[in-house]
Amino acid sequence: METPQISDNTLALAAAEEKAISPLQAIRDYHRAFMWCLWQSAFNSVGSVGGIFGGIAVGWIADRIGRRGSIAIASFISIGAVFIQFFSPSHNNAMLLIVGQFIANCVIQGLGSREDRNAYRIPFALQWIFPVILLIGLPFAPESPWYLARKERDEKARMVLQVLGTKDLDLHLRQIQETIALEDHYAAQTTYVQCLRGSDRRRTIIALMVFILQQISGVIFVLGYSTYFFQLAGFATSDSFKLGVGVTAIGVFGNLSALYSVNKLGRRTLFLGGMIGCTIINFGIGFSSISDTKAARWAEAVFTLIFGLVYQGSIGPLGYVIFSEVSSAKLRSKTVGIGICVNSLCGMLANIIIPIWTWLYIPETKNRTVDELDSLFEAKISSRNFAKAEVDR
């Protein structure tokens, strides 16, 4: 093969042009590439957007048509959304984006070697199984006695309690009725603003922070980007998918272990231990990436697998336990709504805002002395230009 003719002048001119162009001009000139980057982030974040609207709507819907009706509507929406995914034309990313981890990774691993349309259509089709199963089972599922009592259908509620094996039907039904009356009494006096007043403010902050701490622990990286990270670390594509399956599989084991440890160790101890453990493991992943050896790559993979185990055995499930227990009874429904929205927003922030903020504000400080950094900050040099800026001594 002949050596290509390379002109130093051409490369220099091209480099100078790239450095001279402003970010806004780059977005205008390369708008297609810019939009593709946004789609890439959107695929990971659009579920969070749906979660926000779902969290706001589900309480209202469930109170009006019941829990069974809510599940039925969700199942039909899921079937319709998968229908759009399955029959959307190839490469129509906009359509895929509009509609929407162990089983999913297994399916992707099994079909990853295919090169036809079924490589992505079969995973979509398999999603039909779950809403169909729910719809088949719904006629045999009893309605919530709480919903029936709230609608003053007391005899129907009594029948459901009997089916569920309740021993003292009258006592249990009165308990439900009096609890509903108490909640209605509080609901007439409560607003979302009260979640931030008095002692309830502290309880609300605790309830919301458990979700924020979940996101900043690094879960988006491990559960959302682990397969891609394994590829960047040097693993073959097929091995990367296998390791991704391993991350979710070991996470399932962690979830099951939490059923025992959450009551044995307590919420505070387990959550704090999980945060400390995830922090140490993140350091392990970071230090392992310094070396480019095969042993270092496997160390990164092992640390990532351990992260999945520790997170799913502590922080992951505990967030929902603490969230539901720490909120006050009179504000629980409102706190739940706020919490779901905050959880989804944090996911969006982790997927989109954090990388953008890093690109805009994290400067390059390599090979810079203390006085040079002082001068650059004093001169208000853009973080993106720290590396190439010259310091006038």
Image (cartoon, rainbow, N blue to C red):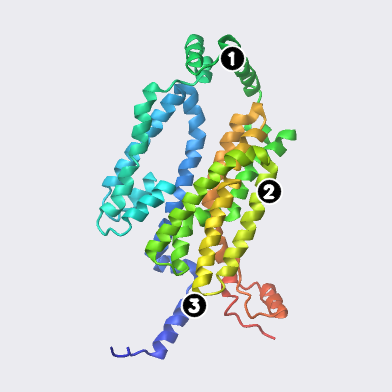
- Residue 171: give x, y in percent of width and height: 61, 11
Alpha carbon separation for disc pair 1 and 2: 37 Å
- Nearest-to-viewer mark from 2 and 3: 2
Q: Upstream in the sequence, badge 1 or badge 2?
A: 1
- Residue 261: give x, y in percent of width and height: 63, 41
SS under mark 3: helix
Alpha carbon separation for disc pair 2 and 3: 46 Å
Which is more toward the observer, 261 or 208? 261
Alpha carbon separation for disc pair 1 and 3: 72 Å
SS under mark 1: helix
Q: Using a 10 Å C-alpha cutoff, classify the residue at mark 1 as few (fewer than 14 neighbours), some (14 to 19) or many (20 or more).
A: some
Residue drawn at x 51%, y 10% as measured from the top left: 154
- Nearest-to-viewer mark from 1 and 3: 1
To which residue does mark 1 refer? 172
Residue drawn at x 33%, y 39% as measured from the top left: 128
Whether residue 41 is visible, yes or no, is: no
Image check: 82 left or right of 182? left
Residue drawn at x 43%, y 54% as measured from the top left: 245
Q: Looking at the figure, which quarter contains the N terminus?
A: bottom left
| Image-quadrant location for residue 8 | bottom left
Q: Which mark is residue 272?
A: 2
Amino acid tagged 1: His
Q: Using a 10 Å C-alpha cutoff, classify the residue at mark 3 as few (fewer than 14 neighbours), some (14 to 19) or many (20 or more).
A: few
- Residue 284: give x, y in percent of width and height: 60, 64
Q: Residue furthest right?
A: 198
Residue drawn at x 69%, y 37% as measured from the top left: 203
Amino acid tagged 2: Leu
Q: Using a 10 Å C-alpha cutoff, classify the residue at mark 2 as few (fewer than 14 neighbours), some (14 to 19) or many (20 or more).
A: few
To which residue does mark 3 refer? 19
Which is more toward the observer, 233 or 301? 301
Number of callouts in the render? Answer: 3
Q: Upstream in the sequence, badge 1 or badge 3?
A: 3
